[in-house]
Amino acid sequence: MSTWINQTFSTKLRETKMQALAAIEPAFREIDEIAQMNTGRVLDAFRRYQLSDYDFRQTTGYAYGDAGRDKLEQIWADLCGAEQALLRTQFVSGTHALTCVLFGILRPGDELLAATGAPYDTIQTVIGFSQPTAGSLIDWGVTYRELAMTDQGIDLERLPAMITDKTKVVLLQRSRGYSLRKTLTIDDIKQACARIHAIKPDCICFVDNCYGEFVESCEPTAVGADVIAGSLIKNPGGGIAPNGGYVAGRKDLVELAAYRLTAPGLGAELGASLTGNRLLYQGLFLAPHVVAQAVKGAIFAAAYFSLLGYKVFPQANESRSDIIQAITLGSPEKMVAFCRGLQHFSPVDAHAFPEPSGMPGYADAVIMAGGTFIQGSSIELSADGPIRAPFAVYLQGGLTFEHCIMGVMGAAAELENVDR
């Protein structure tokens, strides 16, 4: 291994690796403890619901009485501290799951308040505020307002003035998205939900939980959130769920989301497990460990690129509530170089050369690196970012910490070439 490293990377990059590893080693104990705790919670749930290989079977057609599907949703609801869950491969993405919640709950004349500033780019098109979008919430008659975050987090002091009689849903985005703002911890979410419910008890606290599952010891619905949603090709799929998303929370809210996924009156009763449920169960079992690997990789990247002189968010010694590491590179050329270096050290499509391009739901051209086994999987090591100031890339995922190290060093090697 050392010979391969010596032949592949410069002395400076190898020495920086050793410095970064030495600096971050103390943080790994807590990460491992959280992973063990969450693995225990998953095992307890599997035992409690008596998981068996019968639950892995394939179903077709309407799939009425799909016992394996229903059991998986009971387990996920239990792990989220929620009344009910909808966990389906029929969700095409995390954005789709979030959209089903928003359109399931909101009606013309209702108001949506984003209390964590501008949401992720694809949710902006769902809302319809950044650009006119046919079929968006605003097109449907829902009003939208936004509360910017402070450097400390959610602006709890201004929150009461922002919530009106028309405010039906407050959206809290746990992860930073394409921004350098603070990620919400579980404690942040608990405080915000308590504050929102104190101001307006019937207001619905909806958390975009993407990239946050299993990073801490519980999920937002266990501390006051009414409903959450996310993607199975991020954290909870453990790197092997082939696709899908989830919604979890209050029973009535999950049912409304299910009516948007299928049809009113049908809801969660339909939805075939066309390829069986084994990969979903197995991915959920692996998820706490895989998430821990990704968190370690993010911390290593923070330490590594900080030592190389780049601004990183969060810092290596800061607490984590998601798997994303933002690295400010300062130019489009460096963003492209970073992604090409990472791609070159990917297990799939390592020969490809990422180029910025337009993508559905994004206002700017986006550069992406992701040689993943599952297309678009961001629990696997990947990086992306919109080509706009401050020209930051957002690194996430990593099925193994060893691969995270190689990918980070590969990205740094390409940056070396740009600086020459």
Image (cartoon, grey):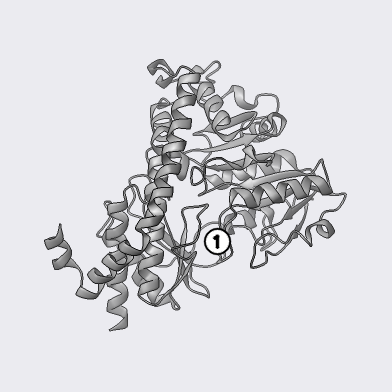
Tell me the quadrant of the picture where the C terminus can be found.
Answer: bottom left
Most extreme residue toward the right is 165
Most extreme residue toward the bottom is 420
Amino acid type of the residue tagged 1 in the rendering: Tyr
Quadrant of the image occupied by residue 342: bottom left
Q: Which residue is mark 1?
A: 362
Mark 1 Cα shell of 10 Å, populated few (<14), some (14-19), many (≥20)? some
Q: Is residue 140 above or below residue 265?
A: below
Q: Secondary structure at mark 1?
A: loop
In the image, 170: left or right of 414?
Answer: right
* Residue depicted at 50% across the width and 52% down the height: 322
Most extreme residue toward the left is 3
Q: Position of residue 290 (x, y in %)?
A: 38, 43
Q: Position of residue 266 (x, y in %)?
A: 65, 24
Who is closer to the viewer here, 32 or 299? 32
Count of marks overlaid on the render: 1
* Residue depicted at 52% across the width and 32% down the height: 88
* Residue depicted at 11% across the width and 62% down the height: 3
* Residue depicted at 34% across the width and 50% down the height: 372
Tell me the quadrant of the picture where the N terminus can be found.
Answer: bottom left
Say whether residue 379 is visible: no
Who is closer to the viewer here, 153 or 131? 153
Who is closer to the viewer here, 138 or 254? 254
Quadrant of the image occupied by residue 258: top right
Say whether residue 24 is visible: yes
Q: Position of residue 352 (x, y in %)?
A: 29, 61
In the image, 110: left or right of 99?
Answer: right
Q: Position of residue 10 (x, y in %)?
A: 20, 73
In the image, 180: left or right of 2?
Answer: right
